[in-house]
Image (tube, rainbow, N blue to C red):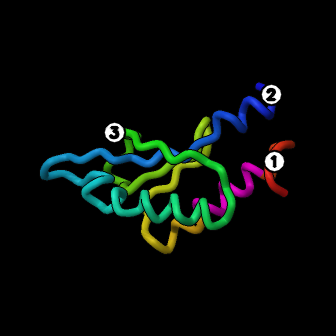
């Protein structure tokens, strides 16, 4: 895969699955983090789309986000850990010839 192609596919997937009477990402707060992570990305000048997905298969570890394609999963997301997601996106982007850094 060519680096430019990879960069054009890069995205942050946010699970928004809601399960009744069971732990889920939406039920654990991920819906509230979508606006926050988008604002943080914009504030730091990172052009990474945020994609809402129904399930990433890790409901018991939610809220969950994942860098795609094929990137790191972030589980048990909270407001403090959002910056860790941003930091990892910066690392991924810095490895791309057309990315920042």
Q: Earlier in the sequence, mark 1 or mark 2?
A: 2
Please tell me whether residue 39 is drawn above or below residue 22 in the rendered image. below
The x and y percentages for residue 46 are 67, 56
- Under circle 1, the secondary element is loop
Residue 49 placement, left or right of 98: left
Q: Which residue is mark 1?
A: 95
Mark 2 Cα-neighbour bin, 10 Å: few <14, some 14–19, many ≥20: few
Question: What's the magenta region?
Answer: 85-93
The x and y percentages for residue 75 are 45, 56
Q: Quadrant of residue 87?
A: bottom right
Residue drawn 43% across the image and 61% down it = 35
Q: Residue furthest bottom?
A: 80
Q: What quarter of the picture does the C terminus occupy?
A: bottom right
Please tell me whether residue 36 is drawn above or below residue 70 in the rendered image. below
> Is residue 52 part of the magenta span, yes or no?
no
Proximity of marks 3 and 2: CB atoms separated by less than 8 Å: no
Q: How far, Cα to Cα, is label 1 from label 2?
A: 12 Å
Q: Which residue is mark 3?
A: 54
Characterize the magenta stretch by its predominant secondary structure. helix
Q: How far, Cα to Cα, is label 3 from label 1?
A: 29 Å
Proximity of marks 1 and 2: CB atoms separated by less than 8 Å: no
Residue 3 placement, left or right of 21: right
Q: Which residue is mark 2?
A: 2
Mark 3 Cα-neighbour bin, 10 Å: few <14, some 14–19, many ≥20: few
The x and y percentages for residue 9 are 64, 34
Residue drawn 44% across the image and 48% down it = 14
Q: What quarter of the picture does the N terminus occupy?
A: top right
Q: Earlier in the sequence, mark 3 or mark 1?
A: 3
Q: Quadrant of residue 62?
A: bottom left
């Amino acid at each position: 895969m060519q680096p430019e192609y990879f960069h054009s596919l890069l995205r942050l997937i946010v699970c928004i699955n809601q399960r009744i009477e069971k732990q889920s990402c939406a039920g654990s707060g991920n819906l509230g983090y979508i606006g926050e992570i988008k604002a943080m990305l914009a504030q730091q000048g990172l052009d990474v789309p945020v994609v809402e997905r129904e399930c990433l298969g890790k409901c018991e570890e939610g809220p969950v986000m994942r860098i795609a394609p094929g990137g790191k999963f972030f589980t048990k997301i909270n407001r403090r850990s959002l910056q860790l997601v941003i930091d990892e996106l910066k690392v991924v982007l810095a490895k791309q010839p057309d990315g920042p850094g």
